[in-house]
Image: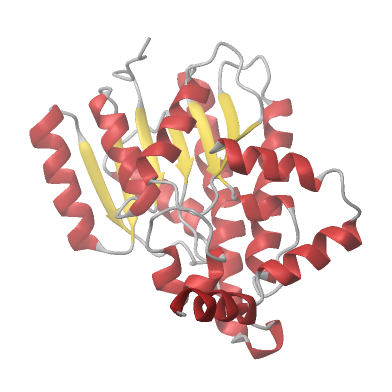
Amino acid sequence: MVIAYNAQTVLLTGASSGIGRSFAIALAARGADLVLVARRADRLESLATELRDRHGVTVHTFPFDLSAPSAGADLRDAAAQRGIRVTSLINNAGFGSFGPFTDADPEHLAREVAVDVSAPVQLTAAFLPQILAAGGGFVINVASMAAYAPSPRMAVYGAAKAFVLSFTEALWAELRGTGVTVFALSPGATSTEFNQVIGTDDATAGARMRTPEAVVATALDHLDRRDPSPSVIDGRGNRLSANAVRLLTRRATVSLMRRITDPSRRDRERARAAK
């Protein structure tokens, strides 16, 4: 049974493309009003117009840089000025970087931590009081398969997503019995702009891609359950991989991940395929 969300006003970050855009389309189809947040105003407005015309829902747009130190409070205040009461939240915005840590730009890493770690915490803290007051809402934080094992060459991204997973599961326990559903969603390699933003396909190590629509379907199926668990992994293969990692020592796990994320391994694979 497909559950309608006509009573929900969902604030969704990273809404202009990929998984965020697919979330917006799926939620609007179920009747939810939306508050769409991303940096690219033109894409937000185009999506908002499409959803209003197709589904008759109310859609607000906020072009916003979530790396700002006071992102949560600023966005809460901006929404309040428009008279918007948020009843649910999806922290989806995020980005990664790939390469040796010693070669990374410190300012880029600081922004990565701000968007991937600080922003979900800030936005959850800022909007949770009104979500609790409304009752019956949800908080979904998008983590990653990278949360389940250290990620050499993506050390900050993997650590950031491990934080999101741990934070969300703890929040799930704290909010039991409040009527607010909380869980972390962990996609694996997905057909989004993730690799394009990073600048290399090596970031997903040649893994088979899932579609954003499949990832969102996993999340909404989990949300529709009577008593959702604190986290859900998208894709059977990804779930098997996460379970397999639990059987390894930490040393074995990080050594395996070092081989998987080694660009020279993919270079050899591409050379063999070209023969």
Judged left or right of residue 16, residue 223 is right
Judged left or right of residue 87, residue 129 is right
Q: Quadrant of residue 166?
A: top right
Which residue is most to the bottom? Answer: 103
- Total marks shown come to 0
The answer to whether residue 98 shows anywhere in this view is no
Instruction: From this view, report whether residue 236 is shown above or below residue 133.
Output: below
The answer to whether residue 236 shows anywhere in this view is yes
The location of residue 133, given as percent across then percent down, is: 50, 22
Residue at the (83%, 44%) spot, across then down: 246
Residue at the (35%, 24%) spot, across then down: 8
Instruction: From this view, report whether residue 150 is shown above or below residue 165.
Output: below
Which residue is most to the left? Answer: 53
Residue at the (66%, 14%) spot, across then down: 177
Q: Nearer the viewer, residue 156 or 168?
A: 156
Q: Nearer the viewer, residue 274 or 38?
A: 274
Q: Quadrant of the N terminus?
A: top left
Q: Nearer the viewer, residue 67 or 226?
A: 226
The location of residue 23, given as percent across then percent down, is: 35, 39
The location of residue 114, given as percent across then percent down, is: 57, 65
Judged left or right of residue 191, residue 222 is right
Instruction: From this view, report whether residue 11 is shown above or below residue 200.
Output: above
Q: How is the image coloured?
A: secondary structure
Q: Quadrant of residue 233?
A: top right
Judged left or right of residue 83, residue 186 is right
Instruction: From this view, report whether residue 42 is shown above or below residue 97.
Output: above
The location of residue 42, given as percent across then percent down, is: 18, 62
Residue at the (77%, 43%) spot, across then down: 244
